[in-house]
Image: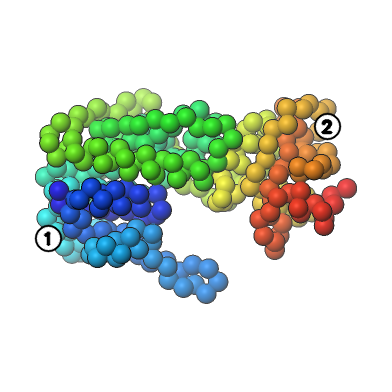
Amino acid sequence: MRIVFMGTPEFAVPSLERLIADGHEIAAVYTQPDKPKNRGMKLLAPPVKKVALAHDIPVRQPEKIRQEGVLEELAAFAPDLIVVVAYGKLLPKALIDLPKLGCINVHSSLLPKYRGAAPINWAVINGEAETGVTIMDIAEALDAGDIIAQAKTPIDPNETVETLHDRLAIMGAELLSETVVKLQNGTAQRTPQDDSQFTYAPMLDRSLSPIDWSRSAKEIHNQVRGLTPWPATTMELKGETFKVFAVEETGENTHAQAGACLGSDKRGIRMACGDGKILRVIEVQAPGKRRMAAADYLRGHPIV
């Protein structure tokens, strides 16, 4: 099948690689423009672009998908199907209607739950026990198209976004491979989304980072798991702001005021939470320092 692929970050890479491995003709890859990063502000190519160039696939990086000439150029690639995976731009109706087999999206949630930019993070932050991937027809409304296929997976209570992201990326690629075959032979089924079950997964920002110790130990644990590695949760300790990358529930109770530091042990820093439980901070990053185990930091910086 002749496919135009639209995607940008690491999450999209397994899907593109699987389509290539399956023998489909990737007519072109559309991805976000190179972005300046790090101290030198050197332009870095998106992960999807690197894969495309390695396979000699034409790459296009329009600043705006609606800008003049983009639709005409895409039409000239004559795709049977457009596959979108974390591209990062909303598509106009004229583009959606272009390929004869449609325009489909691989989304990292069980739609209609968690439509939006950060579905993996919010599933973890909200303490969901299960998530998955959805392949859907793209509609003009955000993540609202008919569902073609879904695959589910449990979320381990201690799993972070980092590991869940990678697992869902592989699941998405596998489900995409199966779905493209069904689209090709005309056996794909569609199910409209139940909008009454809709929830939103907005983009992350640093306003979500500060830990509110008046919340329960489990809620804080989920917050840390869901915001690692970025923007990461933060806590105040000895007048400084630390990033927190990992915590664990100890199962112990305390009558101390929420937010009180109860000292340290061989594993990390013990903190009192709003539900009377103790949470242990086990991985931190002090200002100007690297990310490290809290126990390693405490060896040179005792807190009591």
Above or below: residue 290 compared with residue 96: below
Query: In x, y percent, where is residue 299?
Result: 82, 53
What residue is disc 1 on?
A: 76
Residue at x-position 76% and y-position 48%: 295
Q: Amino acid at mark 1?
A: Ala
| Marks 2 and 1, how far apart at CA | 67 Å
Question: How is the structure coloured here?
Answer: rainbow
Query: In x, y percent, where is residue 78?
Result: 11, 55
How many discs appear?
A: 2
Query: In x, y percent, where is residue 99?
Result: 14, 48
| Quarter of the view holding residue 180 | top left
Mark 2 residue element: loop
Residue at x-position 25% and y-position 28%: 192
Above or below: residue 273 compared with residue 161: above
What residue is disc 2 on?
A: 256
Say whether residue 61 is visible: no
